[in-house]
Image (spheres, rainbow, N blue to C red):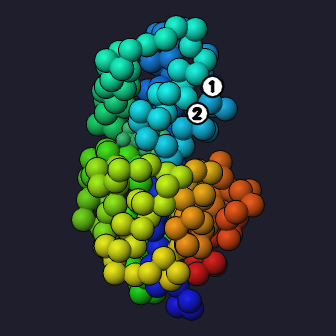
Amino acid sequence: MGAYKGIVFDLDGVICSTDHYHYLAWKKLADRLGIPFDEQVNNRLRGVSRMASLEIILEKSEKAYTDEEKEAFAQEKNDTYRELLKEMSPKDLTDEVRDTLNELRARGYLLAIGSSSKNTPFILERIGLGDYFDAVSDGNNITHSKPDPEVFLKGAERIGLDPSVCVVVEDAHAGVEGAVRGGFACAAMGDAKDDPRATWHMDSFSDLKKIL
Ligand code: BG6
Ligand code: MG
C-alpha cells in the first residue's frame, strides 16, 4: 500500500460527470439574463460554492443585482440542476470509476468524498453509491469552499487519517490548491490535469491504480 492509507475524492467531474449538468444549469440562467457564459467561465466555477459561482457569472453582467435577487438566481439554477440530477441512475457511474474504486478498496485504502456540493448525498444516491464511501464531507458541513482545504480536512478526519497519508483526487484548480494547502498529495485530472501544484497528472481516473 505504500505511504498512503486513504483517498479523498472530489465528486463533480471526478466520480461522475455532473460538472456538465452544472454547466447546463448555469447556462440556462445566464442566457435568460443575457449574460455571456461559456466553457471558459464554467471552468472557473469548478470546486467553488454555488454563491461564489454566481458572483463569477455576474462579473459579466451589465446590471447590478440585490442580495435577494442573487438568492433567487442561485435557487433557480439549483432547481434546474436538480431536475437534471433526477434523471441520473447507477448507469451514470462508469465501469472505469466503479472498478477502480472497488480495486482501491480491496487493496485496503479508506475512501472518502470531499465535495463543495450540497447536492452530494442526492447524487451519490442516484448513482448507487449512497452507502459506499467510508466518509462523506461536502457542502453541507463546511463554512469555507475550495480553495480552502476545510472540506478535505474534514474528510480525512472522518476516516481517522492525517492529511499526510491521504491523496486528494481533483478536476478543479481550486481543489488542487485546497489539497496542497491542507497538506495532501494530489492526483489531478480533467480541467486541472496540468496544474503544476499537483503531485500526479492523470489522463484518466483508472490511472489511480498505477499511482497508488
Ligand atoms: C462543486 C462544483 O463540486 O460544487 C461547483 O464543482 C459547484 O461547480 C459546487 O458550484 C456547489 O454545488 P451545489 O450542488 O451545492 O450547487
Ligand atoms: Mg470537480
Q: Residue at x 74, y 56 (%)?
A: 194
Q: Residue at x 47, y 35 (%)?
A: 52
Residue 116 place in picture, x, y as percent: 41, 49
Q: Is residue 38 above or below residue 167?
A: above
Q: Position of residue 62 (x, y in %)?
A: 58, 8
* Residue 75 lies in quadrant: top left
Q: Quadrant of residue 70?
A: top left
Q: Amino acid at mark 1?
A: Asp
> Quarter containing ligand 1?
top left
Answer yes or no: is residue 92 visible.
no
- Does the beta carbon at disc 1 come under 8 Å from ligand 1? no
What amino acid is labelled 2 in the image? Asn
Is residue 189 something that shows in the picture? yes
Assess disc 2: are there few (<14), some (14-19) or many (≥20) residues with their C-alpha within 10 Å of its C-alpha. some
Q: Secondary structure at mark 1?
A: loop
Q: Tell me residue 157's x, y (percent).
A: 35, 74
132 horizontally vs 153: left or right: left
Q: Is residue 77 above or below residue 205?
A: above
Q: Are marks 2 and 1 in contact (CB under 8 Å)?
A: yes
Q: Secondary structure at mark 2?
A: helix
Residue located beneath label 2 in the image:
42
Which residue matches tag 1? 38
Q: Can you say which quadrant of the picture contains the C terminus?
A: bottom right
